Image (cartoon, grey):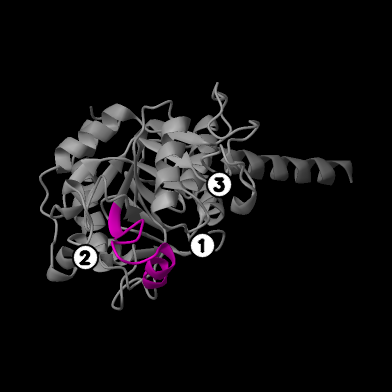
Amino acid sequence: MIVDTMAGIRVILAALLCALAAPAEKRIPVRVVVVAMFERGADTGDEPGEFQYWVEREKLDRVLPFPQGYRDLRINRSGVLGVVTGVGTARAAATIMALGLDPRFDLSHAYWLIAGIAGIDPADGSLGSAAWAEWVVDGDLAHEIDAREIPPDWKTGYVPLRRNLPYEQPRRDQDAGEVYRLNPALVDWAYRLTKDVRLDDNDTIRRRREQFAGENAQRPPFILKGDTISGMTFWHGKLMSQWANDWVRYHTGGRGNYVTCAMEDTGTLQALTFLAKARRVDRERVLVLRTASNFDQQRTGITAAESLAETKIGSYAAYLPALEAAWRVGRVVVEEIASKWPQYRDRIPE
């Protein structure tokens, strides 16, 4: 009996040693992750959202089940991986964290391109334009009192966390998720690489931009550097745009300039920040590109409420041109990195 038991133990130990010695399943090396926020229907062949042009034109043909995230993943033969986060900071954070911890992928050297549509401040840009952000500011983390109860000497009812007054100084420097700064050298590189990309213009957006004052609002679509604010609330109007300018200026210590408004990027960046601490990703390899599907405020002659009623997904004045711009500008960066991987794998471009 003792002999049989010892023989059984030796068999089990041998099996364990063989299992330990066997090579682990090879992880898929990813060169670039393209992060879209929504898709309206199928990934291909119907009315597009932010993901469809990437799937069809970058040949993201291989579908990878992703039940722990918002939508299945797609990847191509060049190591470009596409993910859809879902709308809002909560879904974005959950999806990106799930992707970063997925054992199938090696994301240690991957670059991340967040590419989606946004509202734009007419003081800075025009419909169909594309803005590379260096600063991403959270528009949700705050105290707030109702507008009907704002003291007469307050500019807004929004107050920074752990402060008693709007824009109270000194500003808190500790990291509470209110602001993220991207690698400025990488942002500059992406801007220089793409600044001359031609963007689509048409009569619809031409007529709409003529209803706004200012040189930048009336320019044909162009590429610029400009910062973005993220929040779960889809806000709209001239006064809210002024708040966004002040809020970004406050949280960046005057170094950032609000240009676009969106809903997910701080959630994505919070997840990437935690994943970088776990050495799963490199936070210095993140880019945010937002393209203008609509202005963030009303045109001359109508109210903010009337303008908001016109501002529905799919019916934005520059919806399709903005989707086109996100792919057309973003693809230059994606294909540069993916096609010259030996150059960019271990060295971030400057």
Query: What crowding class fits label 3: few (fewer than 14 Cα within 10 Å), some (14-19), or many (20 or more)?
Result: some
SS for callout 2: helix
Q: Amino acid at mark 1?
A: Tyr
Residue matched to label 3: 140
**Dot 2 amino acid type:** Arg
The first of marks 1 and 3 along the sequence is: 1
Residue depicted at x 34% and y 62%: 50
Q: Could you tell me if residue 103 is visible in this image?
A: no
Q: For numbered disc 1, what is the local secondary structure?
A: loop
Left or right: where does residue 136 sit relative to residue 321?
right
Residue 214 % position (x, y)? 20, 49
Report the residue marked by disc 2: 208
- Residue range of the region highlighted in magenta in the rendering: 291-312
Which residue shows up at 37% across the image and 67% down it? Answer: 307
Q: Is 181 left or right of 216, judged from the image as shown?
A: right
In this rendering, the label closer to the viewer, 2 or 3: 2
Question: Badge 1 is on which residue?
Answer: 70
Residue 103 place in picture, x, y as percent: 52, 47
Q: Judging from the image, what secondary structure is the residue with disc 3 in?
A: loop
User: How far apart in space, not on screen, are marks 1 and 2 (Cα)?
Assistant: 34 Å
